[in-house]
Amino acid sequence: MFSYGESLALFAEDQEADDERFLQQYIDYLNDREQEDEEDGAEKQKTPRPSLQCVEDPFLYLLPMTLARLPAAHGRLAFAVADFRDQLRKAREDARILLSDCLGEGTKSVSRRYWELWKDEPIDLPHIRTELIPAHISGYADGWVVPVMYTDAEFLYQSGSRMMLHEVCYPETVQELYDFLRSVYLRRAVRFKHCRLCGKLFAAVDGDRTEYCSRETEGKKTCRDVGAARVYQKKLLGDPVKRAYNRAYKTHNARIRYGTMTREEFQQWTEEAKKHRDACSAGEISLEAFEAWLKK
């Protein structure tokens, strides 16, 4: 399952190279299968089908369904994969405009900007149904609900699960899935921002003050978990005045623990150090003079 809040952001920026590798593997697989079938006495299905297990792009899950509707002529199937690749490219280019322009931070009216960009291409949603789906959620991603995997209404009723009516999309093409996601964003007027830490787009569903995305950056921590501290450290490293002050601050603060400086003395030193730091930042004293004072 993929959340609304991350689907198009991932599609627009993160997955292009991975998608291309997967599609090329699929084309190679179909070509190998065709060659194996033409060879006398060759064992069938020697070449394994590329797995979707580790694919992070929801659009790629349409590929097997697309191929299943076609006659089993390998040359035609390989051509269909190449056409699928072109559909992805077109939708991805459109998605980048949508997220950075129409739903960007600087757009005042989402509906008007949509009309200006796509007035000759209204959204057509032929495969949308209103259905009962589980109201229970299995997780969150950028604030959007991710439904549980079991969606059979009869099973859910018998198990006593709580349910809700919701729009459900059954796309047959890349464009249909993209149009469905695009309509959700436009109706909710969700703004997209560039994460201050990783620089990638994300849905700012938690409000305009959100500055960091929920992508994992190290271990299980996300940009939102470590973003503010990391950006602050980057600023320190880029500013020699702040870096010198921060280093001296830690040294003097440690003296309280070692008993060589009282807390009152530390507070007095901090007030003086801030005055010298600000004077150095303003160019009133040199960095060398400031560092010499810190070493006293």
Image: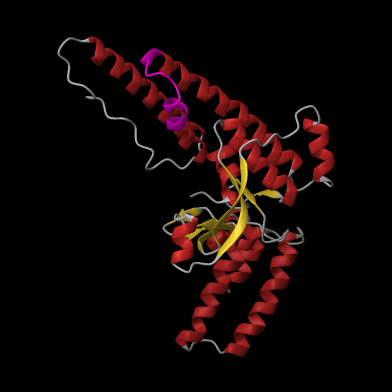
Q: Quadrant of residue 135?
A: bottom right
Q: Is residue 15 left or right of residue 4?
A: left
At horizontal 50% and vertical 57% (from top left) the residue drawn is 153
Residue 143 seen in the current view:
no
Image location of residue 217, percent across then percent down: 48, 53
Please give the count of numbered marks on the rendered protein: 0
* Image height of 108 relative to 26, above or below: below
Location of the C terminus by quadrant is: bottom right
Q: Is residue 20 left or right of residue 200?
A: left
* Bounds of the magenta segment: 63-75
Q: Quadrant of residue 208?
A: bottom right
The reply to whether the magenta stretch includes residue 65 is: yes
> What secondary structure do most residues of the magenta stretch adopt?
helix
At horizontal 66% and vertical 84% (from top left) the residue drawn is 268
Residue 224 seen in the current view:
yes
Image location of residue 160, percent across then percent down: 47, 69
At horizontal 58% and vertical 88% (from top left) the residue drawn is 263
Looking at the picture, tell me which residue is in the foreground, 95 or 128. 128
